[in-house]
Amino acid sequence: MDDSVLRRTLAIAVDAIICVDAEQRIIFFNDGASAVFGYAPTDVMGKPLAMLLPERFRQAHGHHMARFAGSSDAARRMGERSEISGLRKDGTEFPAEASIAHIRTEQGLVFAVVLRDVTERRRFEIENSELVRDLRGAVAARDDMLSIVSHDLRNPVNAVKMLAAAILRTGDAAPLPGEVGQHADVMLQAAKQMDALIQDLLDVSKLESGRMSMSPRPIAITEILDEATEMLRPGAEQAGVEIRRAAQPRLPSVDVDPDRIVQVLSNLIGNAIKYTPRGGHVTISAEPIDDFLQVTVADTGVGIPEQELPRVFDRFWQSKRTNRSGAGLGLTIARGMVRAHGGRIWIESETGKGTQVHFTVPRAARPTRANRE
């Protein structure tokens, strides 16, 4: 290749490309260097490279160049050297990264420097770090507010629950006048629903901040399935939905926090019952897959439209098919708890053909007594 072609190519490069001789005097200064430093090539040719550095770095830079000239390294690339500072013609300093190579030619030693102005990147990093700090502060403030509000809300909610329950117990001894019993029952159910919403908000906050406590231990998965199933069975019977179990016999034990996984299953089974019409059924199954155990909750309900599937785990999101009861946090919480155990959760569904929610949890290293029997 003609030297003039190579020289012109280097001249128009965006990065600053500078060559200096053994005395560190500038012998090449491309267009990129002019744009970065503000000098025309004629302003700097033959002058010391030190003029492009803040004065406080010039002596140390000279020593670095001398050591590099005598080293066995032919080049030092960007990322291998610490960030440096450059000095523009107008006296302003700027952060930069540079690669440097020493080349022995017939005319003597030549140092070639490729320098990149990283002012914009540094500004972005600072703005980004400030944004992260502000976001962390906002999340902390939100969590504090949730904690305070939840505590203050729970006191009156618990009072309503206790009073409504007391009224209903009075009805066991003697008939309550008019519709008092019915109204008290509505009050009790509404208070329970509010209590559940408060707990959901607290759970989401803890999961997002990493403060959700987990106490995993080896346990037979059948114990967890039994507890969750029996907890939801009365609601299923009231809705006219049958709960079925299709778990394989002698399943491996799992290493989980039982209370958290029961909560996951309660959310999933509760959703399945809600969206399954009377006469339908919900099937809970489990099977070992490699180092995990996969649990599936399948229903014969209305299904989820394909366009809604990517959003089902979003906070506060609710399907158009829902009656808008609840805060739309159940699946968000379920996903957070499954992930906290090192598992994953996903949904398969088709409108009119039901929904299958699958999640995995780690198998225990040793079988539990219930699984050995």
Image: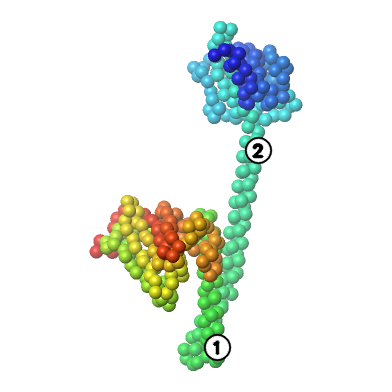
Closer to us: 301 or 111? 301
Question: Residue at image x 55%, y 68%?
Answer: 324
Would residue 97 be seen by someone viewing this image from the given angle? yes
- 240 lies left or right of 16: left
Local packing at callout 2 (Cα closer than 10 Å; few below 14, some 14-19, many 20+) is few
Question: Residue at image x 58%, y 68%?
Answer: 151
> Residue 110, position in %: x, y?
58, 13
Local packing at callout 1 (Cα closer than 10 Å; few below 14, some 14-19, many 20+) is few
Amino acid type, callout 2:
Arg
Closer to us: 77 or 346? 346
Answer above or below: position of 173 versus 306: below
Question: Residue at image x 49%, y 17%?
Answer: 72
> Residue 143, position in %: x, y?
58, 59
Checking the image for residue 179, the label placed there is: 1
Q: Extreme left residue here? A: 373
Q: CA distance from mark 1 to mark 2?
A: 68 Å
Identify residue for label 2: 123
Would residue 260 be seen by someone viewing this image from the given angle? no
Q: Extreme top residue here? A: 106
Q: How is the image coloured?
A: rainbow
- Closer to the chain start, of discs 1 and 2, is 2
Answer above or below: position of 38 versus 268: above
Checking the image for residue 188, the label placed there is: none
